[in-house]
Image (cartoon, helix red, strand yellow):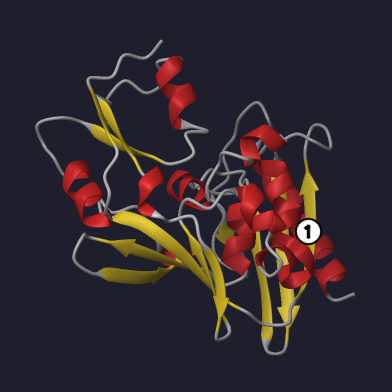
Amino acid sequence: MAILAEYHKPGSVAEAVTLLRRTDVRLRALAGGSQLVGALETRAVRDVDGVVDLAALGLNRIVAQGGTLHIGATATLSDISEHPVAGEMAGGLLRRTAQFEGPVNLRNAATIGGVIASAEIDSEFYAALLVLGASVVVSDGEGERVTPLADFRVPASHPLITAVTLSIHPLRSGHARVARTPSDRCIVAAVAVVGEGVERVALCGVGERPLLAGGSLNPPDNWKGSADYRRAMAAVVQACALTEAKG
């Protein structure tokens, strides 16, 4: 079992940021804990002395207002899937891709902020956020900064992800994937949306993180699939996803 020296449950974003910026102890933000807790238990992560629990910050709200969907960073994938606006965007794209993040007990704990902070190579939910034009809101304890997800990297200075915003537009979506089994996380996948003046595709499995199609690919070469195989399959799933999105 992981042994932590400190546990904090701040009551404000400013307090949380102050704790995460401490240099005398190595603290990590704890939201759903779907990845961090397991990594601590198995000692896959060792450079952690304590956690900053975000549960009391009220960052789990999902609000649709004025053509913008605001999703708090600690909203779970299940919360998003069940929300009447978030779950139905682009034909239910977020709900559809959330299913491939893991089983329902994981989706009940995993948060949208955690998905973004982890930016896993095979996260189809992250890819869906990319094609939907998501932006990430981070706070330094005094103010907020908004960055398009396509340009976002977790800052080294420890600002806190507080929300994700999406514009609400009528879009059609498509999704295609290659995996060892239908329920496995993907080897390669594509997510597409089309609408008035919009055509975007995001790819998984061909770079360090999911990315928008159109740039250079740098796929890994590992036991799940060679780099050449991933490049070839990327073209196939991209075409399939676009075909579905265009109806």
67 up-or-down from 46: above or below: below
Q: Name the side, left or right, on which 160 lies relative to 62.
A: left
How many tags in the picture? 1
Residue furthest to the bottom: 196
**Quadrant where the C terminus is found in the figure:** bottom right
140 up-or-down from 19: above or below: below
Q: Nearer the viewer, residue 169 or 223?
A: 169
Residue 108 on image: x %, y %:
62, 40
Q: Is residue 35 visible?
A: yes
Q: Name the side, left or right, on which 200 lies relative to 44.
A: right
Q: Which residue is mark 1?
A: 175
Element assignment for label 1:
strand
Residue furthest to the left: 24
Residue furthest to the right: 247
Residue at (49%, 23%) from the top-left corner?
A: 38
Residue 113 on image: x %, y %:
46, 51
Residue furthest to the top: 1
Q: Quadrant of residue 160?
A: bottom left
